[in-house]
Image (cartoon, helix red, strand yellow):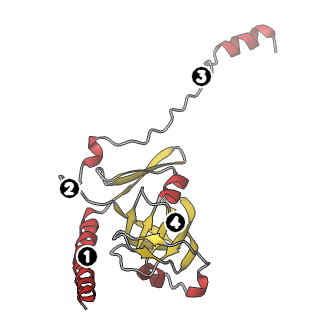
Amino acid sequence: MSVARLLTEDSNLEPKRARIEAPLVLGFSADDKIRTIQLYDDALVITLRIEGYDVKRVLVDQGSTVEIMYPDLYKGLNLKLEDLTTYDSPLVSFEGKTVNPRGQIRLPIQTSSDVVEVDFIMVNAYSPYTAIVARPWLHALEVVSSTLHQKVKYPSNGQVIEIVGNQSMARQCMVAAILHRPNAESLASVERNL
């Protein structure tokens, strides 16, 4: 093949362009509030796949440093006390009371195709939630959450994945917590008066 022919063939090729990938932006806009009930002050309550089961009433708590599991979920997953490992640090409940954990267990949480294993602390206390996911899970997935927009967003395989909160469930949990609280307060006042 002649040099002239090679030059002619090469000149017909389109120049290669550098592929520029835009970084994913995790944020929220007014469009993210569509289909939310406004004005509200609801907690962010979602459904997550934990240990292969779809678990409802999971509270997203950015302020907590540990994932919590309550007895309903523990029993629902058919776990036994011997499945727990020791966890000795006391925790403080929403009501400001000290709670001694029963132990901890490492379980997978699956969202879309992503799986993150987290250490759940099992506490034997009342909660309208089945579990609480906290900063360890949020940071492992690089989650950004918004109670205002009732969503969780995180990057996965070059795209942004969303988990939408359930405001109806959040309100049911709030009502259950309020209905449970007077019983505890009236019991405490009876005990003080004895």
The residue positioned 30% from the left and 63% from the top of the image is 166
| Gap in angstroms between the C-alphas marked 2 and 3 | 49 Å
Left or right: residue 45 versus residue 174 is right
| Gap in angstroms between the C-alphas marked 4 and 1 | 26 Å
Q: Nearer the viewer, mark 3 or mark 4?
A: 4
175 w.r.t. 154: above or below: below
Q: Could you tell me the amino acid type at mark 1? A: Ala
**Residue receiving disc 1:** 176
Q: Nearer the viewer, mark 3 or mark 1?
A: 1
First in sequence: mark 2 or mark 4?
A: 2
Quarter the N terminus occupies: top right
Q: How many residues crowd around disc 2 within 10 Å: few (fewer than 14), some, or many (20 or more)?
A: few
The residue positioned 24% from the left and 71% from the top of the image is 172
Q: Position of residue 9 (x, y in %)?
A: 69, 15
Q: Nearer the viewer, mark 2 or mark 3?
A: 2
Q: Could you tell me the amino acid type at mark 3? A: Arg
Q: How many residues crowd around disc 4 within 10 Å: few (fewer than 14), some, or many (20 or more)?
A: many
First in sequence: mark 2 or mark 3?
A: 3
**Residue receiving disc 3:** 17
Discs 4, 1 touching: Cβ within 8 Å: no
**Residue receiving disc 4:** 109
The quarter of the picture where residue 125 lies is bottom left
Q: Could you tell me the amino acid type at mark 2? A: Tyr
Discs 2, 4 touching: Cβ within 8 Å: no
Of helix, strand and loop, which one carries label 2?
loop
The answer to whether residue 83 is seen in the rendering is yes
**Residue receiving disc 2:** 40
| Gap in angstroms between the C-alphas marked 1 and 2 | 18 Å
Q: Could you tell me the amino acid type at mark 4? A: Ile
